[in-house]
Image (cartoon, helix red, strand yellow):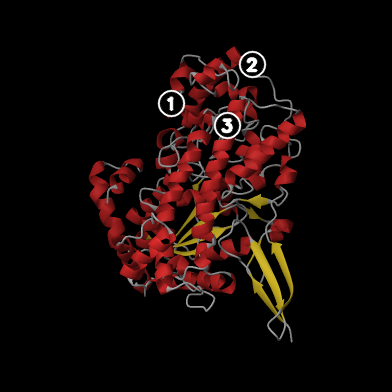
Amino acid sequence: MSKRIVVDPITRIEGHLRAEVIVGDDGIVEDAFVSSTLWRGLEVIAKGRDPRDVPLIMQRICGVCTYSHYLKSTMAVEDALGIKIPYNAELVRTLMNASLFLHDHVIHFYHLHGVDWIDIVSALDADVEKASKLAFKYSDNPINTGENDLKKVKETVAKFANGPQGMGPFANAYWGHETYKLTPEQNLIGLAHYLKALEMQRMIAQMMAIFGGKNPHPQV
Amino acid sequence: MKWAGAITAMLALPSSFTPLMAEAVKVADRLPIIWLHMAECTGCSESLLRSANPSIDSLIFDYISLEYHETLMAAAGWQAEENLEQAMHKYKGRYILMVEGGIPTGDQEYFLTIGAHGHSGKESAVKASENAAAIFAIGTCSAFGGVQAAAPNPTNAVSLSSVTHKPVINVPGCPPSEKNIVGTLLHYLMYGTLPALDVYNRPKWAYRLRIHDLCERRGHFDAGEFVEQFGDAGAKDGYCLYKVGCKGPYTFNNCSKQKFNQGTSWPVQAGHGCIGCSEPDFWDVMGPFEEPLGDALYQTVFGGLGADATADKIGIALLTATAVGIAAHAALAAVKPPKE
């Protein structure tokens, strides 16, 4: 008999998402449904407002890819009214969009998607020296993977994982599952990057704040 | 712990509290946090990630135990729901509930559902609030309803305080700065009690003063030097943005002092007026965002008085004098926001 599997909430995304999968006895997916379980009606709210306010409203679609909705809805208003923007405005928009591009990739790759393939628990078994050398295989200038760095990462996470309060946001996950393919050393490098990237994204967001006043949700 | 001094100063505590602050956060167990996402955009979570003093990684690993946070947690589906259940059970009466997003209610309650069983957002927010030690509404959506509650409010979204009988500390802003979110947490960590609040239940240490009071462009306001339109000579000279719609005079927050992104900038510094994002119903009452409120002032929900009536009356007198002078420029908006 077919089995219905529901994954809701799907985590590490912006917003609310539900996936339902029908799996047959042979383990093959027969059907799948995905639904977003939140509706806010921003389109309805935008109707009848001052067109200059609408991009600020539309920006609130997403706080992760914050600037993209702001930019596109601004362009939509300009298209509708036949407005040509000055060259300086184009430059500032490009710079802000580039900082969003950079920021969003770091956040998405490490903090949202990363733990789907970095096994944090396996990283605790890694050989620090081996991992530090291995990092040079992937980059000539590896970041946060010196022996001391990795040792510190391991200590921080080990203390956290073995403490009485459990693993917080990393609790009850799928650690040790066969679909985690990386070696302990590779996992440790990934984990070190996860932590370093928390610091990097903060700096990248400052880039957008220079032009847009703040991030998320710049206002210019 | 080099950030302890900065935080102590921000919370307006005497500097003798600095070592105490450092001590308090070290001694305590990691503070269990349950963070729920309602009708929201995750901007407040992103803002939390920008925290530098203390940094977000030291927060997560050293000071708080982030039991449930849909944007950061590794588990999904029923494992995620199990984490929430267990945290509510294990830390009953001890956890901090932080909620991001407005809450659809009434016939529209099921415009937001969470979990395999399709419980509404309201159900999970009410359930989690029952046994929380303290409840923080993070962001304007959860504090006052936010963008989805703007007219005509298609999902009948309301604030967290409207669905729970428990006291709720509002930390509004769209999003609130990382300092206001983390500062509220550290204040609780240090005292184990709730901070002094204003009439909208906002912590006074952050929301006591008007943006206008400490604005870096305030001198230009007082001197009558205004940006008349974006891109003019006044804009290049950093003149006051009141005439192009700055809502700083009606908005209570610490942006002009603390700024955003580790003090990098804030909207007024970047050349756009404040839109009043930490005030109730700002989407409806502060717009159009690029026109001065001018005559519209008395039509606001605050009756033009804001959160601090006495100080604002003086402010209104000043603004009215200014408004007379600029009446010609303060053309009424071609399009008014829809009324309910």
Residue B36 against residue A215 in the figure, above or below: below
Question: What residue appears at the point 29 percent right and 56 percent down from the top-left corner?
Answer: B24
Real-space Cα separation, disc 1 to disc 3, in angstroms: 26 Å
Residue assigned mark 1: B216
In the picture, the quarter occupied by the C terminus of chain B is top right
SS at circle 2 = loop
- Which amino acid, mark 1? Glu
How far across and down, in percent of the image, does residue B159 sit?
A: 59, 51
B41 and A117: which is toward the camera: A117
Q: In this orientation, does residue A181 appear?
A: yes
**Structural crowding at the residue carrying mark 1, measured as other residues with C-alpha within 10 Å and reported as few (<14), some (14–19) or many (≥20):** some
Residue B270 against residue A3 in the figure, above or below: above
Question: What residue appears at the point 42 percent right and 65 percent down from the top-left corner?
Answer: B94
SS at circle 1 = loop
- Which amino acid, mark 2? His
Residue assigned mark 3: A91
Question: What residue appears at the point 46 percent right and 68 percent down from the top-left corner?
Answer: A170
Residue assigned mark 2: B329
